[in-house]
Image: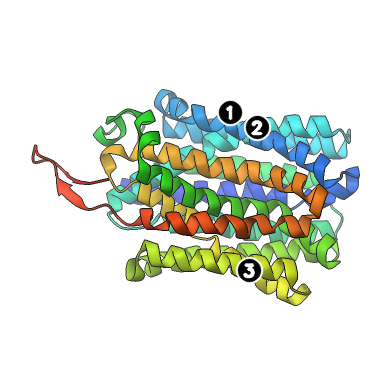
Amino acid sequence: MDSLVRARNGTYLAFFAAGLALTSWSSRIPTIKDQLGLTPGRLSTVLLGFAIGSMIGLPVSGMVIRRFGTRGAVGGGAALLCLGQLVAGVGVDVFALPWLIMGGLVVAGIGMGVWEVGANHEGAAVERRLGRSIMPWFHASSSAATVVAALIGSLLTFLDVPVLVHLIASVACLAGASAMAVRSFFPDDAATPEQAAGHPLAAWLETRTVLIGVVILVAAFAEGTAGNWMAVAMMEGHGLPDWLGVLGFAVFLTAMTTGRIAGARLLDRYGRVVVMAVLFVLAAVGCLLVVFGNAPLAFLGAAFWGVGASLGFPVGMSAASDDPARAAGRLSVVATLAYTAFLAGPPFLGFLGDRVGVLYALLAVGVLVVPALAAVPALRPAPVVVAASGGTPQPRN
């Protein structure tokens, strides 16, 4: 039990550190945009570097975990993330070169992709051993870090602290937290039977798994676009100052964290399908308030949006892990779809913002809620049957 408690606490810390690192960067995006005089389209091109890097890191993360273990994957990912953020910070404040910032973000994105899959891999192992839902709490830990980082970012923006100084402090915290987290993980010396079972690519052909991927894709798109564009939309669409725009982003993150903390109990009481259907509707309402409301209503909409986007990612991960014998392959599918939307969505929204404005571009989130609602029934836990060999009960897909 001691090793389980240590692994649980280490996983909390790993998720917290990831959220801190990501939001330390994204909270300074409005400053970077203004400082370098970037249009939404040019800013999107720079941000695309992080998406490109992550799309490299995500597909190879499984091989990295098999070769170096979860500890090696998270530790190595943290090192790349630190290096990439430092290069990006130098690109902003020392050379003012968008291509150097983009290059740093590619390296950071590779590190984040490997880090995130490794942390979710460890989280799924902890959840299976605990025998109860805890994934929303792991993601709540990440969300809590984003709230802290966003508030710090708002303060440092108000104080006009250079981006590079901010990122150096963030990287120092990230390095220390990641080192502490990986020492607490389960040993990497043996793959469990559920990790070894099945061909990982077979999950891409399973209807239920792909539908779960659709749900988590939309939730990740709603989270990612808000993370990169909420503050900018508040500033440009509602005429708010930089620091107040970042505070609107903090409202979104606070609401999302609250939804994840309360989410486990709601899921146990009402089930995945009902809870997720309500939350997606709430996210759509929040999107409409942000776009069409006045400034106070936009802040309320940011809160609705945050709650609505709170559980899609952790619930999707848990649903993909219903059958422990095939959890690894299915997690890789839904994680790839989720992070594709999370990372590619913000640059797409920026290009759309060049044509219709950033504020109205956010309506893409409300449009995508429709297919997500259609796919929500796939989250229902699969019926459990006992394998013919008399082994562990398996859910039927």
- Which numbered marker is on residue 280? none
Residue at 53% across, 67% down: 281
Residue 106's quadrant in the figure?
top right
Element type at mark 3? helix
Residue at 71% across, 75% down: 297
Element type at mark 1? helix
Residue carrying label 3: 286
Residue 193 point in image, percent of width and height: 24, 33
What amino acid is at disc 2?
Ile
Residue carrying label 1: 56
Q: Choose mark 3 or mark 2, whichever is in front.
A: 3
What amino acid is at disc 1?
Ile
What amino acid is at disc 3?
Gly
Q: Residues within 10 Å of mark 3 (few under 14, many from 20)?
A: many
Residue 144's quadrant in the figure?
bottom right
Residue carrying label 2: 52
As drawn, 223 above or below 73: below
Q: CA distance from mark 3 to mark 1?
A: 33 Å
Judge left or right: residue 192 versus residue 328.
left
